[in-house]
Amino acid sequence: MSIFCRIDDKHVPLYRVVWVSATPHYCGEEDCVREGSYEIRLEQGEAVWASLAERDEMLQRLEAWHGDMDVPDDGEENW
């Protein structure tokens, strides 16, 4: 498995991803070109903007990359 995921025209290393947006960007500005895109925040304050398909692929690759880690499902706390 590759440690990269292609977002737009960039090959993003999985290990640089801090978080992935669950909802599309909306700021209400008339000239905003990012509305409807999903933010993928990288370390050092950088970000890339993804389509829904690219966001879903990133999530799948991150989950596959982390493999067998004992991570609770959404909404469940493992105390």
Image (cartoon, rainbow, N blue to C red):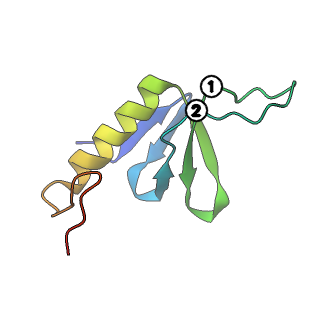
How packed is label 2: few (under 14 Cα within 10 Å), some, or many (20 or more)?
A: some
* Lower position in the chain sequence, tag 2 or tag 1: 2
Q: Is disc 2 in contact with disc 1, using a CB cutoff of under 8 Å? A: yes
Q: How far apart are marks 2 and 1 (CA)?
A: 5 Å
**Above/below status of 20 relative to 38:** below
Nearest the eye: 13 or 32: 32
Dot 1, how many residues are within 10 Å of its Cα: few (below 14), some (14-19), or many (20+)? some
Residue 30 point in image, percent of width and height? 87, 24
> Of the residues shown, which amino acid type is indicated by label 1?
Gly
Mark 2 — residue?
Answer: 24
- Image quadrant holding the N terminus, namely top left
Q: Quadrant of the C terminus?
A: bottom left
Q: What residue type is labelled 2?
A: Pro
List x then y, in percent, for residue 59: 35, 41
Q: Where is residue 70 in the image (x, y as percent from the top left)?
A: 15, 64
Q: In this view, does 31 lie to the left or right of 3?
A: right
* Secondary structure found at label 2: loop
Residue 26 position by quadrant: top right
Residue named by callout 1: 36
